[in-house]
Amino acid sequence: MSGRSALVVANASDADAGYVGDRLEERGYVLRTVFRDGGGVPPTLAAAGHPDLVLLLGSEWSVHAPVDGAALAAECALVRSACSSETPVLGLCYGAQLLAHVLGGRVTVAPQAELGLVEVDTADPDLVPSGPWTAFHVDMLTPPPDATVLARNACGVQAFALGGALGVQFHPEVRPEVLDGWARRFPDLVVQAGLDRADLVARAGDLAAASRRSAYTLVDAFLSRRVSAV
């Protein structure tokens, strides 16, 4: 797997691929990041230089109420191009919502925000462990009709797979310091969720090793099942 490339799609303010990026690099991938902001996403896999894998990071943006319609359209086109060429795509939180949107599912506002360290009920623990996972979202996804739902919790579908694509509603990549940054940027969401920022970040720190292991398990299984199959 040495020498493979991964195209990372992110917002400029949230471009840390974290544990997921670490594991991809350990597995021989060279990461190249493009930004949704300012029209930086190539609309086709060819325009992106034919990466071997596409990683869609989270975002404070929303799929169902786009901040930048042109940027959303370009990213959707990129994902369609990747899926049509059987290039594996891993979508995290907003990335999973975008995957669902492109592949025939839908995205809506969640009844309540989901923040903090969560567990999921998993149908495939070898691919999607039960956690702990970091959650930080106010939207929810309905997976595509033909997708396999891999995990759920009280807040809805947490992971699904279709073809070479895997979408997870949580954030396997996020380190405690990134979570702290989000909690500082969006303090009202933290309060609405009934959480205290210092306690939230402390708990994330206590569970960091377990979260990293879960992230590495997910990446390894994704590479084994989705990448090796194409």
Image (cartoon, rainbow, N blue to C red):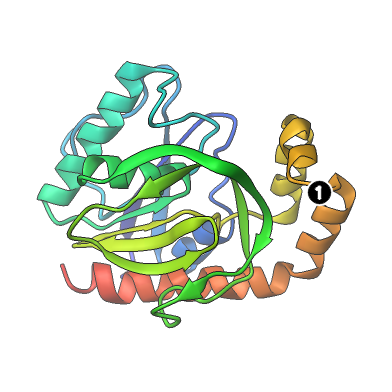
- Please identify the quarter of the rendering in which residue 117 is found: bottom right
What residue is rendered at 18% in x and 34% in y? Answer: 44
What residue is rendered at 87% in x and 55% in y? Answer: 199
Vertical position of residue 122 compared to residue 31: above or below = below
Marker count (numbered): 1
What residue is rendered at 33% in x and 18% in y? Answer: 69
Vertical position of residue 76 compared to residue 7: above or below = above
Q: Quarter of the image for the N terminus: give it.
A: bottom left
What residue is rendered at 70% in x and 46% in y? Answer: 178
Q: Is residue 182 visible?
A: yes
Does residue 191 appear to the left or right of 8 in the view shown?
right
Q: Nearer the viewer, residue 31 or 213?
A: 213
In the rendered image, the residue lying farthest to the left is 84
In the rendered image, the residue lying farthest to the front is 111
Q: Quarter of the image for the C terminus: give it.
A: bottom left
Residue 106 coordinates in the image, percent (x, y): 31, 41
In the rendered image, the residue lying farthest to the bottom is 126
Q: Amino acid at mark 1?
A: Leu
Residue 142 coordinates in the image, percent (x, y): 34, 49
Q: Is residue 49 visible?
A: no
